Image: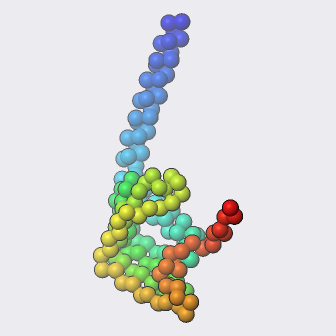
Amino acid sequence: MKPLWRMLRRMMLLSVVLVLVLGVGLTLFVRTEQFRVRLREQLVTTLNATLRGHIDLGQVEGSIWNNLTLHDLVVTYRDIEVLRAPRLTLRYDLLSLLHGHLLITQLEGTAPIVRLIQDPHGAWNLLEALSSETVEEPSAT
């Protein structure tokens, strides 16, 4: 019984050490330029596949844990540049992402240029550009 207990203790200790090493490695990796480039590519791809407008983005900085700074952000909709921001910092609730929603708690832009146009039906181009490509059907209750 003693050898089994020793083996279990060693396995538990090894598991804890492995989790710690992976945690430190992940923390260090998300601060690298390679990660920021991949994050930028993933953000642009996901946003362009999800939103009605088109997103162009220069660089991404910050921490994925609670805030990101986007450099040279351009949003176009129907061939019109709707938003241009040399720098846009957003803070968000990371836990909301686990539920499939993005809850932005603070948004700060440096010298943004916004071109708002309201169509005959009352819809604003910026809101249309940032709305989802697919329309959700109301659930039947």
Q: Is residue 37 visible?
A: no
Picture quadrant where residue 114 is located:
bottom left
Q: Quadrant of the N terminus?
A: top right
Residue occupying the point 42% across, 45% down: 26
Residue 86 position, x and y percent, is: 34, 76
Please provide percent x and percent y for residue 39.
46, 60
Q: Which residue is situated farthest in the right direction here?
A: 140
Residue at x 46% of width, y 79% of height: 75
Residue sitting at x 60%, y 73%: 133
140 vs 77, nearest the viewer: 140
Q: Viewer-proximal residue, 102 or 79?
A: 102
Q: Quadrant of the C terminus?
A: bottom right
The outermost residue toward the front is 141
Residue sitting at the far top: 1
Residue 52, above or below 24:
below
Q: Looking at the picture, how far across and down is residue 2, in whole percent?
A: 50, 6
Residue occupying the far bottom of the picture: 120
Query: Is residue 12 depicted above or below 102 in this figure?
Result: above
Q: Is residue 47 rendered to the left or right of residue 111?
A: right
Of residues 140 and 136, the one drawn nearer to the viewer in this rendering: 140
